[in-house]
Image (cartoon, helix red, strand yellow):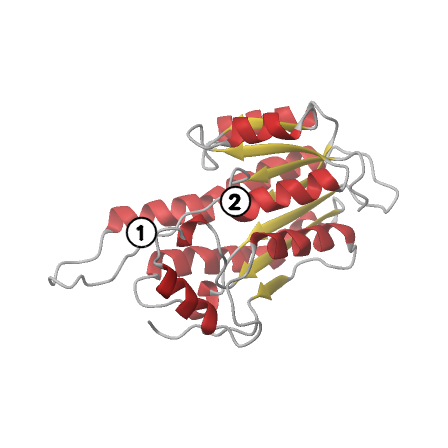
């Protein structure tokens, strides 16, 4: 799909992978809506980028919020691209070190944001896209979701994060098949260890150690490398129903 002049929605667009994607889409000629929490820097970022970027404060698990974000996107024109980056992590174990059971509340919250939020955002954006006229390439829309290599090799303490991201991987092919008759493509990116705000509280020594665990290139991934792949998925009409690992050949150890 040609991004020049289209309308795009990026969740989690005020930081990390989402912000890099906003910059890439904007540079490629798209009008972009940043959907992120009201406490984020989304409003300031949108103002700094000019008239083709707007901010929609939103919780991805809220039907009201995400419909409002889609409305903002459609104020630019028909919504053709969704890049869904919003999510959260957090440690959960089945049995804590003190012998008590792991937190069901934390587990449910991670799954609700990462998996239910993905389903909610995808269904609402796809409903808008299904009303579009076909583009010159014969498409109505493209949706790029975000999983993680933890979906395949979750580490100890990642049971909530890993199972929620495995759910995103599992829904990808089903969503692509479901939306094929509507000329909407769905793909997922599964990043490895990336230099995002989730790693901001990790020490520099730990960051270097994490980067060294990647076979090649032996470093943390950059958000722009995610954004580059997201835009390639948008532009390549044969990419559909696929989850692409973006990890430098990393396979996570148990801990």
Q: Is residue 216 left or right of residue 89?
A: right
Q: Nearer the viewer, residue 199 or 8?
A: 199
Q: Nearer the viewer, residue 135 or 46?
A: 46
Classed neighbour count for the residue bearing mark 1: other residues with Cα under 10 Å, few (<14), some (14–19), many (≥20): many
Find residue 31 and report its horizontal and vertical position in percent.
Answer: 71, 32
Write the residue at 60% across / 55% down.
226
Disc 1 or 2, which lies upstream in sequence? 1
Find residue 50 and report its horizontal and vertical position in percent.
Answer: 67, 26
Q: Nearer the viewer, residue 33 or 74?
A: 33
Point out which mark residue 209 bears.
Answer: none
Find residue 211 and report its horizontal and vertical position in percent.
Answer: 47, 68
Above/below status of 10 relative to 157 = above
Outermost residue toward the left?
98
Location of mark 1 (residue): 107
Write the residue at 11% across / 61% down.
98
Q: Under tag 2, what secondary structure?
A: helix
Location of mark 2 (residue): 119
Q: Under tag 1, what secondary structure?
A: helix
Above/below status of 50 relative to 96 = above
Outermost residue toward the front?
204
Q: CA distance from mark 1 to mark 2?
A: 17 Å
Find out whether the residues at labels 1 and 2 contact each other: C-beta distance under 8 Å.
no
Write the residue at 67% across / 56% down.
229
Find residue 96 and report its horizontal and vertical position in percent.
Answer: 18, 61
Q: Quadrant of residue 69?
A: top right
Classed neighbour count for the residue bearing mark 2: other residues with Cα under 10 Å, few (<14), some (14–19), many (≥20): many
Can residue 39 be seen at all in this image of the molecule? yes
């Amino acid at each position: 799909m040609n991004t020049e002049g289209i309308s795009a929605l990026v969740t989690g667009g005020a930081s990390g992978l989402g912000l890099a994607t906003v910059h890439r889409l904007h540079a490629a000629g798209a009008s972009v809506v940043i959907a992120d929490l009201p406490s984020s820097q989304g409003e300031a970022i949108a103002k700094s980028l000019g008239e083709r970027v707007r901010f929609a404060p939103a919780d991805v698990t809220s039907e009201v919020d995400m419909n409002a974000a889609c409305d903002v996107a459609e104020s630019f024109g028909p919504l053709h691209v969704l890049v869904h980056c919003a999510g959260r992590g957090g440690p959960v174990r089945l049995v804590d070190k003190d012998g008590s059971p792991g937190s069901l509340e934390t587990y449910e919250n991670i799954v609700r944001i990462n998996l239910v939020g993905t389903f909610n955002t995808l269904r609402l954006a796809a409903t808008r896209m299904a009303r579009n006229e076909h583009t010159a390439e014969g498409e109505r829309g493209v949706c790029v979701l975000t999983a993680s290599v933890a979906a395949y090799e979750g580490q100890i303490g990642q049971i909530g994060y890993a199972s929620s991201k495995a759910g995103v991987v599992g829904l990808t092919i089903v969503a692509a098949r479901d939306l094929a008759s509507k000329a909407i493509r769905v793909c997922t990116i599964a990043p490895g260890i990336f230099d995002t705000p989730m790693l901001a509280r990790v020490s520099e020594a730990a960051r270097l150690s994490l980067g060294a665990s990647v076979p090649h290139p032996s470093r943390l991934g950059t958000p722009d490398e995610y954004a580059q792949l997201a835009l390639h998925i948008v532009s390549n009409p044969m990419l559909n129903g696929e989850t692409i690992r973006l990890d430098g050949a990393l396979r996570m150890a148990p801990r």
